Image (cartoon, coloured by chain):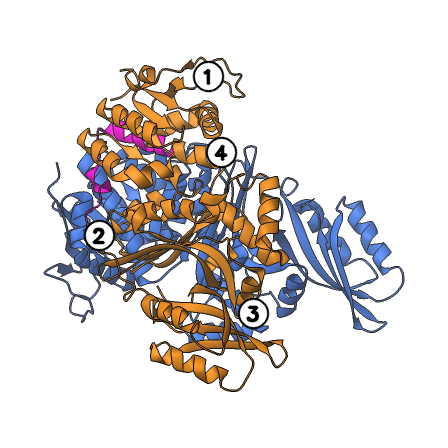
Chain colours: A orange, B blue
Amino acid sequence: MVEKISVGLLGLGTVGSGVVQIIDQHQDKLMHQVGCEVKVRKILVSDIHKKRDVYLNGTRLTNDPSEVLNDPEIDVVIEVMGGVETTREYILQALRNKKHVVTANKDLMALYGSELLQTAVENQCDLFYEASVAGGIPILRSLVEGLASDRITKMMGIVNGTTNYILTKMSQEGRNYEEVLQEAKDLGYAEADPTSDVEGLDAARKIAILGTLGFSMHIDLDDVSVEGISHVSKEDLEYGDQLGYTMKLIGLANRTDDKVEISVQPTLVTHSHPLAAVHNEFNAVYVYGAAVGETMFYGPGAGKLPTATAVVSDLVEVVKNMRLGVNGNSAVIPQFEKNLKSPEEVLAKYFLRIHAKDQPGTFASLTSLFSEQDVSLEKILQLPLEEGKIAEIIIVTHNATKKNFENILIKLNDLDVVVEVKSSYRVEGDGNR
Amino acid sequence: MVEKISVGLLGLGTVGSGVVQIIDQHQDKLMHQVGCEVKVRKILVSDIHKKRDVYLNGTRLTNDPSEVLNDPEIDVVIEVMGGVETTREYILQALRNKKHVVTANKDLMALYGSELLQTAVENQCDLFYEASVAGGIPILRSLVEGLASDRITKMMGIVNGTTNYILTKMSQEGRNYEEVLQEAKDLGYAEADPTSDVEGLDAARKIAILGTLGFSMHIDLDDVSVEGISHVSKEDLEYGDQLGYTMKLIGLANRTDDKVEISVQPTLVTHSHPLAAVHNEFNAVYVYGAAVGETMFYGPGAGKLPTATAVVSDLVEVVKNMRLGVNGNSAVIPQFEKNLKSPEEVLAKYFLRIHAKDQPGTFASLTSLFSEQDVSLEKILQLPLEEGKIAEIIIVTHNATKKNFENILIKLNDLDVVVEVKSSYRVEGDGNR
């Protein structure tokens, strides 16, 4: 039986400091849970002389990665340094040296998860990454364990705090995207270059990880169709609200028979859906299982202590497994062949907003285009924009294939009566699971 | 290494049939997760000749409990028969015969959990009971594992579907308690005798289980102060709504320093709080951890397949532990001394609705009573009820001790200006954690 666990940390930024702090402050509780002492032995940093805010309690700082990766005393490597290529090398080396790895790195896991997990299993090591998706929410463990005996058919996640903050403010205060984005930058909720968040790339990495785990099939980042929120207008939110929907950036993974769809897009979610009540920078992942039905996991998506807590939870699992001698469980490796839905197979409701000529026959032209594409309408809202000249027309369809709806979008531009196609969004939350 | 797992089932009602169905239909997935065959060998039923809806696949029915409890071939006993005293005997016998136990029985766990867990650990057996609280939500496992490195300071649960359904309908449709209760009975959402649900007893058992696990101290059912919803009026909901609150029956467990409060009561929850968006028969448990901050777990609280899914998840854990040879982990036994808060130590905001004489001096009398008890006011709403005669007065306090607020309730009756104290409720969701 293992008597003492030594941890090597890669990185001592915000999350790293949180990890050190939690391990230090919860030593008693940790001891009680895993039955032995857990100590941070070495930390890889770029500057060993920099003044640190965290109490290091004798832990040695080093700027030589091999001091951590090749130290035979170190049992577990915790990676909180970020980055992808170098980090991948370090983690591979740690695993080959039979060190278990805990990482909070979604970019790395979305790109190289498959290779890293394979290497971990080959070396009978654990590789855990709970903190990489929705930091404060134990969603990965819940997918693997809690829902173990169910078949997951749908996941929808609000997995990016910055965009949820922006959409919440736009919606609650009737403000424009640019204005709220600027405020979010000023407040530190958005990065100076917010592209990865607002264009949906961050969310795409997380839904790729969720899809891989929930469906047990290897989802590549390239499999995710991605649309961000930078084109979302306050008018879209207002009309959406009138028709009963709240705008959210949703990472979506669904499975019908054995075909899957993985995407990220601004989505109008029915007011009564639990995701619609997830405000500000909070994250939530909604999971539909064939047996269990609807569940949702809500919490902070980022932040020093939430993320560090998830990292330490993973560490606790590693240590338990070490004491049991059962690391490197191969069940974490995807088991099923990936089979993506074509646009003809993706079914959804859509919201469409257009400006059209306010004249007799407009609606007839529109409806004949829709029925030509075999798409029927669920809700229609028409308002005069310029009296007798231009009308604002909003349509919510019944379920349609993505292909047919895209055909409609293309052909709308050829219609004489259409002045401008303003926007279109996917609609979720009433019925489709 | 274990090669094949045999399960004995106690009971074949709704949940039992679901368990049999899931084990049968997910044999491949189970095999993949635990690495060996899992088979239901025998089922204890009261009538072995009754026609069953479920495909039994060769499983033997028996009406002799010892056929299950003493069968040396049976590794795991799943208890889904309900009841308390006899069931306790059966489970004790199973554990003493070194059989692991999975139960969905909240009554049993709330009353005898301590004894049963102790017996399990003494016999190196697992005793899991995920399905006993909020069936479709893996909350117990999340408390034990996901939040392992955190210190939980508050839990608030909507853990009774019947009362949440009733309150949702009352609130959304402006209807009376009695009317909605009758409808719930007609629809099968409420039992013919709904006492255990509507008087908060069912919720009390669940919050006792959550408190025990989340705080690692043994909470007895008698430690829970309980108030049901049968006296809640539609006026209370309407005025609550006007002031920004939604009425929910909340099971509450909080901890300040090392003192805890465990209670169940109808509670006005701030609209923006995630619990306020939990509608109809859904359950949710909100957990506040010192490090992770706010998290919430949402899902179905009952139902055949959600409950059966939770049971099978526990079974999967048992089997994994068997294959690892690590059953009977003593970490599930409460570690800390219980220390309940006195009414002087319980701090909360309160909502109070009274009918008072509509005359000069009324408010002065009221406010002097409040300030005498050291309670300050956050919100006040006054409306004429009978012009010039009676006023409807609604007050929301700032934080006050339970003791002081109870003093106010008593002394209000002595005030000349007070016609009737209509209702009072705890308020949660803005600020207190």
Residue pointed to by mark 4 = A305
Q: Which three-letter amino acid code belongs to the residue tagged 1?
A: Asp
Q: In what element is the residue under mark 1? A: loop
Q: Nearer the viewer, residue A376 or B20?
A: A376
The disc placed on residue B98 is: none
In magenta segment, residue B294: no
Q: Secondary structure at mark 2?
A: loop
Q: In the shown orientation, is residue B148 left or right of residue A381?
A: left
Q: Distance from label 2 to label 4 (Cα)? A: 35 Å
Mark 4: few, some, or many residues within 10 Å (few <14, many ≥20)? many
N-terminal of the pair, mark 3 or mark 4, is 3
Q: CA distance from mark 1 to mark 2?
A: 44 Å
**Amino acid beneath label 2:** Lys
Residue range in magenta is A313-335
Of the pair B194 and A381, the residue shown nearer to us: A381
N-terminal of the pair, mark 3 or mark 2, is 3
Q: Residue A338 has which mark?
A: 2
Q: Are marks 3 and 4 on the same chain?
A: yes
Residue A406 in sight in this render: yes
Q: Amino acid at mark 4?
A: Leu
Give the mark count: 4
Report the residue marked by disc 1.
Answer: A47
* Magenta-span inclusion, residue A326: yes
Work out whether disc 1 and disc 2 sit on a shared chain. Answer: yes
A315 relative to B379, above or below: above
Look at the numbered discs 2 and 4 and tell me whether their residues touch, using CB distance below 8 Å: no
| Distance CA(mark 3)–CA(mark 1) | 55 Å
Task: Give the residue type at disc 3.
Answer: Gln
Residue matched to label 3: A242
Q: Residue at x 45, y 24 (%)?
A: A12
